[in-house]
Image (cartoon, rainbow, N blue to C red):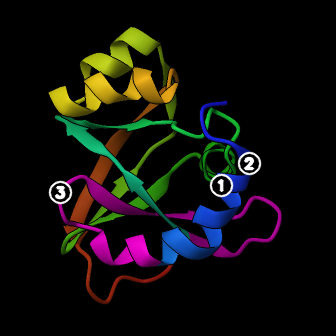
Amino acid sequence: MAVPHVVRRINKRVTNPLLRGLAGHGWFVELEHVGRRSGRTFRTPLMAFRNGPTVTIALTYGPDVDWLRNVRAAGGARMHVGSRLVTLGAPETLTEQDGLNRMPSPVRQMLPVLGCHDFVALPVLSERPWRGATPLA
């Protein structure tokens, strides 16, 4: 796992709420997913990269993160990108090389240094204006 558990906990409680405000700026997005056990809607800030009909996400915390388990269980999620709401399908695991090839150059160079070797791609199913969007159910 690339990032220690202590950093995960700090990010979840402190950093993530601050990063939600960056959704739609640069590579920052907000992933909306439903808890597989609780049924609650969660919003997780991430960096995601659009490659035509797919969105690629580097799994900097490794492949066992809660948001990815939730998305796999639900078969998809929604992503807030600026003023757009993008509906995503089921994630597909990518090889490290394929994932790196989909990253912009500065990110591609930093991920191996950070110990990130896992990537997923999610197909874009639809896209519409975000404001006033209904929660996932």
Q: Nearer the viewer, mark 3 or mark 1?
A: 1
- Res 34 seen here: no
- The answer to whether 137 is drawn above or below residue 29 in the figure is below
Which residue, given by chain and number where applicable, does mark 1 sit on?
Answer: 8
Residue at point 58% right, 45% down? 75
For marks 3 and 1 on the same chain, the one whose residue lies earlier in the sequence: 1
Residue at point 37% right, 57% down? 87
- The answer to whether 13 is drawn above or below residue 109 in the figure is below
> Which kind of residue does numbered mark 2 sit on?
His
Residue 30 in picture, x, y percent from top left? 40, 65
Which quadrant of the figure contains the N terminus?
A: top right
Residue 33 shown in magenta: yes
- Asked whether disc 2 touches disc 1, contact meaning CB atoms under 8 Å apart, the reply is yes
Left or right of 110 on screen, residue 8 = right
Which residue, given by chain and number where applicable, does mark 2 sit on?
Answer: 5
Residue at point 73% right, 54% down? 6
Which quadrant of the figure contains the C terminus?
A: bottom right
Residue at point 52% right, 25% down? 115
Q: CA distance from mark 2 to mark 3?
A: 27 Å
Q: Which residues are magenta?
A: 18-42
Q: Helix or strand or loop: what does disc 1 sit on? A: helix
User: Which residue occupies the foreground of this view, 110 or 78?
Assistant: 110
Quadrant for residue 113, please give it.
top left
Q: CA distance from mark 2 to mark 1?
A: 5 Å
User: Which residue occupies the foreground of this view, 137 or 101?
Assistant: 101
Residue 97 in picture, x, y percent from top left? 37, 10
- Asked whether disc 3 touches disc 1, contact meaning CB atoms under 8 Å apart, the reply is no
- Res 10 seen here: yes
> Which kind of residue does numbered mark 1 sit on?
Arg
Residue 26's label in the rendered image is: 3
Q: Helix or strand or loop: what does disc 3 sit on? A: loop
